Image: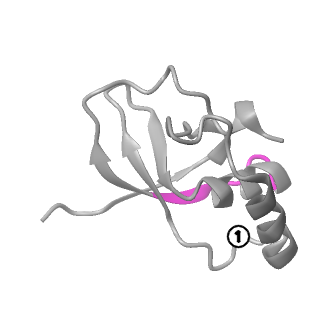
Amino acid sequence: MRIPEYLDVDPRTLHLPSTRPTGADPFKLQRQIAQYGASTQGIPPIFVYRGTDGGLIVFDGVTRATRVAKLQPGTLVRVEVIGELSVPCAHLPTIGEQLP
């Protein structure tokens, strides 16, 4: 069993998965903003994979990361690296590039 790796990163730098290239679902994002506002207290870690180029791709938590990136630019979020990919991820858009 591998030891979990946790990092604090700027959510704007996280790459979006190929299944969500346009970013967070706007309705889900609005719901989270209404419910939690800009608060990061109690936010669960965002699960990411690391690409061969060192970039981090969001596996779970696109909406949470987008909410923090939009409402609190420069605030770091806790991510958990859950695995390594055998491909680079630099070609994928970042959350910062797709902010609404």
Residue 14: horizontal and vertical position, in percent?
Answer: 56, 40
Residue 73 included in the magenta stretch of the image: yes
Asked if 46 appears above or below 53 in the picture, the reply is: below
Asked if 52 appears above or below 43 in the picture, the reply is: above
Of residues 24 and 8, which is closer to you in this image? Answer: 24
Q: Residues within 10 Å of mark 1 (few under 14, many from 20)?
A: some
What span is in magenta? 72-79
Q: Quadrant of the C terminus?
A: top right
Of residues 74 and 64, which is closer to you in this image? Answer: 64
Instruction: Assign the magenta stretch its main secondary structure.
Output: loop
Asked if 18 appears above or below 41 in the picture, the reply is: above
Tell me which residue sits at (68%, 77%) in the image. 41
- Label 1 is placed on what type of residue? Thr
Q: From this viewpoint, which residue is outermost toward the top?
A: 91
Residue 3: horizontal and vertical position, in percent?
Answer: 22, 63
Of residues 75 and 37, which is closer to you in this image? Answer: 37
Tell me which residue sits at (84%, 71%) in the image. 37
Residue 96 included in the magenta stretch of the image: no
Asked if 36 appears above or below 6 in the picture, the reply is: below
Left or right of residue 97, residue 58 in this image: left
Residue 54: horizontal and vertical position, in percent?
Answer: 39, 31
Q: Quadrant of the N terminus?
A: bottom left
Q: Can residue 14 be seen in this view?
A: yes
- Quarter holding residue 2: bottom left
Left or right of residue 6, residue 23 in this image: right
Of residues 5 and 14, which is closer to you in this image? Answer: 14
Q: Is residue 38 visible?
A: no
Q: What is the secondary structure assignment of the residue under circle 1? A: loop
